[in-house]
Image (spheres, coloured by chain):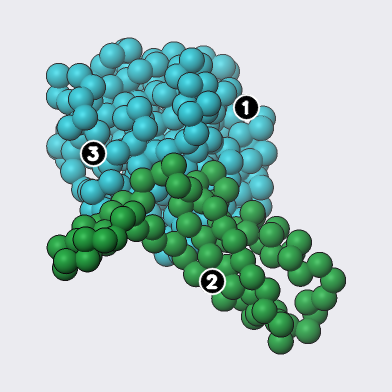
Amino acid sequence: MTQVRVVVTLKPSLLDAQGRVVQDALHSLGYTEVGRVRIGKYLELDLNEEANGDVAARVREMCERLLANPVIEDYHFEVIS
Amino acid sequence: MSAQGTSGRGSGPAVRRGPKFAVIRFPGSNCDQDALHVIRNVLGRPAEYVWHRERDLQGFDVVVLPGGFSYGDYLRTGAVARFAPIMDAVRAHAERGKPVLGICNGFQILCEAHLLPGALVRNTSCRFLCKYVSLRVENADTPFTCAYSEGQVLRIPIAHGEGRYVCDEATLQELEAQRRVLFRYVNARGELTPESNPNGSMGSIAGVANARFNVLGMMPHPERASEKILGSADGRGVFESLVLSAVAVA
């Protein structure tokens, strides 16, 4: 079985409001070495036996169309066979 | 201002002729009944619900995408609703130059569908905000705002967790140059201040139109502010504008 692991994050130019809250919380716990915190989404896609050919191209299309919003988010993924 | 009398048949609750409104219902829509109520019972204009599985908007003049949490806001607000069967018809309706109004979640869906530029992300405060805000009408020369006057300050509630409007710098400049920002968050005196921006939106943008001015997305809820008895009737002008502009076209 092929598995795809996708990570989606807000573009660096955008304020990640949740990330900032976590950063503040880490600081208040004494982890002052922590700089910027970004929160993203992690998706695991299990591909069935139909998945052959250019898996990466298909996954890129999934990311562009649905899994990420390219207006505000970046994504990257890895294909694990 | 009021659209009363434009039909020449006086006011009253009887449903008059005039633009027919479609209120799209997605699983998770929760402002659909408010929108229908205002159009039918306050303005006295015909309105029908249209289920998201439908594919046809024939016979409708105005399409409203109401607020709510379509598809549970899973993945991103509006991300799944954007692919609902009805959205092809909404896109075709917009391409014909007919008005589409997206309120709150409707605005988020229109951005995801690329019928409007930019996107709506989590409020800078990370809080869900449910309160009255002051809005300034920035352009009263559109089908959504012609019942208002430019610079008019409205009191309309917001209710959202993801209402921070963002877009890239080039888009922002284009929106400003083309006067496509129809509503901005201001203070009660109509002044633009950092404190009057509830969610951190770029340019304090509360409502933005497409280049043809027939698609509007706004985070505040005009349908919740259309009757004095409910606290404010300032939002009614959005619906009245749509009626006025439809009458002008016909």
Chain identity of mark 1 = B
Disc 3 crowd rating (10 Å Cα; few below 14, some 14-19, many 20+) is many
Q: Colour of chain A?
A: green
Q: Amino acid at mark 1?
A: Gly
Residue at the (31%, 55%) spot, across then down: A35
Quadrant placement of the N terminus of chain B: top left
Q: Dot 2: what SS?
A: strand
Q: Is residue B169 above or below residue A50?
A: above
Q: Which residue is mark 1?
A: B97
Q: Amino acid at mark 3?
A: Pro
**Residue B119 drawn at (x, y percent):** 47, 43
Can marks 3 and 1 be said to lie on one chain? yes
Q: Dot 3: what SS?
A: loop
Q: Check residue B198 in the rendering and tell me which mark sits there, or answer none.
A: 3
Q: Colour of chain B?
A: cyan
- The residue at the far right in this view is A53
Viewer-nearest residue: A37 or A15: A37
Can marks 1 and 2 be said to lie on one chain? no
**Residue B174 drawn at (x, y percent):** 52, 21
Give me the C-alpha separation between circle 1 and circle 2. Answer: 38 Å
Q: Which residue is mark 2?
A: A43
